[in-house]
Each structure stands twice: as structure tokens, then as C-alpha cells.
Image (cartoon, helix red, strand yellow):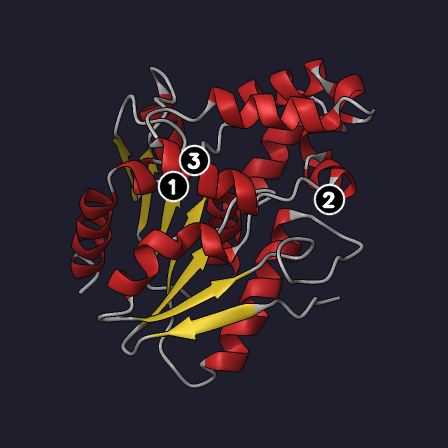
Amino acid sequence: MIVPLAHDLQGDGPLLVLVHGITENRHSWDPLTADLARDHRVLRVDLRGHGESPAGDDYGVATLADDVAAVVAEVDPDGPPPLLVGHSLGGMVVTAYAAAHDVRGAVNVDQSLDLAPLQAGVQAQAENLRGPAFPAVIAALFDSMRGTVPDAEWARLDALRRPDQAVVLAIWGLLLDTTPEELEKAVEAMVSGLTAPYLALDGIDPGPGHGEWLARRIPQAQLEVWAGLGHYPHLVEPERFLARVRRFEAELG
């Protein structure tokens, strides 16, 4: 069942959808929104169980994507397909959206689709994640990915995060409750049929061979690594990121 998502709209122009990462909300995009709204109609959503959106009983990536698609249909029922930009969990969501719905293109910010390394780390912390140590584990995870985010910006992000244990565990069920083989099949199914232009922009280097891994699954994908910036490259170098999104968009014709 679709969950009605809290959302906002700013600006005028072609529709651009921004999707945040796990435990965060649409305000994670605040430093970029005004600039994007100069020449786009910017739709920002709170995923189910995040921000001001209600919880749901299913947190599969395809379900999260369908929630977003329902908001797009509500706010722009007769418009052309949107451009999607997602960070972290949002990168997974826009990938699933682009595989199931019409889009002009999708930008995945620092969310490797090769989930095997993340699965290994999450399963190693399974007991702590399911117990009272959950807040400390989540805080340590974000700290490990901070990269070069400035202090003031990190404090802003930290203040808006709401690590809901039930929601995180439901989303990470894909990692916690599957074998590596099952996870790989789930990823293959998620990207099946994805033919739209696709940009994967990583601030944490996904490692050697990742480009080939990605190309086997999304042949048209562009992979770009801004090494050393950490999990939030769009907030560490916002002007560079905004220019890159517009350059990607210009290539769509």
C-alpha cells in the first residue's frame, strides 16, 4: 500500500526529484535546493518512516520508489518524466524508480549497488543493531563516512537525523536476512529493465573493478569517483555537484 509522503515543491521548470538517505529527511538537501530551483521545479520527499512521513509495513526499495512515484503523479500528472537525484538509500530508491517508471535520468550519489561489502559489515553488527547499542552503532557508521564535510554542515546533518531502530532494521532486512547469493539476485532484479541515462557519483571509492561490475548490470551507467570526499560529496563540493548535475541533464537532450 502506498504511503502518502510529506513533500515540498520549489521553483519552476522541468521536474527534478531529490531523495534523501537513511535516517535523514528532505532538509538534507537544503544547501542545494535554492540553486536547483532557479531552473527546475524541485520536489523533495520524506521517505516513509522518515521526517514528517508516516511509517509503513513494508520497506522494500521498490515500495519506497513507488511511494515517490505516487507523489510525482500527484504533483505533475501530465508532465514529462522527472530527473531523479538520490543520496545513499535515496540512490537505491531512484535506481528502483528508474527501473520501474519513466524518468529522464537518474543520479545516484554515493550508494554502491554492489551491496556485498555493506552486507558483511551490517551482519557483523547484527546483534548490536537489534539491541540497545543501536544508536551508538549508527552514530559510528555515519562518523566513519563523514569524509571532509565541514563542522557546521556536519552538525546540521546530525541534528536532522532520526535513527528509528524499527525503520532502519526493516530497510536493512535486505542485508540482514539474506545470503550473499540472495542479495545479488535482489540487486539484479532491482536494476532489470533500467534503460534510462544513469550517473553514479561516489565520494567513497567503491574499489577496483566496480566500474566493470556496474557496466554489466547498467550498461549505460556513467561512474564518477570524487575520491576522498566521503559519503556526502554533494555537500562537500556543492558548486561542483550542481554543475555536474546540470551537465548530466544537458546530455539528456
What's the distance in space between the residues labelled 2 and 1, CA to CA?
Answer: 21 Å
Nearer to me, 67 or 153? 153
Disc 3 or 2, which lies upstream in sequence? 3
Type of the residue with mark 3: Trp
Q: Quadrant of residue 127?
A: top right
> Mark 2 touching mark 1, by CB under 8 A?
no
Label 1 sits on residue: 109
State the residue at coordinates (48%, 42%).
Answer: 157
Front of the two marks 2 and 1: 2
Mark 2 residue crowding within 10 angstroms, few (<14) / some (14–19) / many (20+): many
Tag 2 secondary structure: helix
Residue beneath the point at 54% across and 67% down:
69
* Drawn side of residue 202 relative to residue 20, left or right: left
* Amino acid type for the residue under numbered disc 1: Val
Q: Nearer the viewer, residue 88 or 153?
A: 153
Which disc number belongs to residue 154?
3
User: How many labels sit on residues?
Assistant: 3
Q: Secondary structure at mark 3?
A: helix
Quadrant the C terminus occupies: bottom left
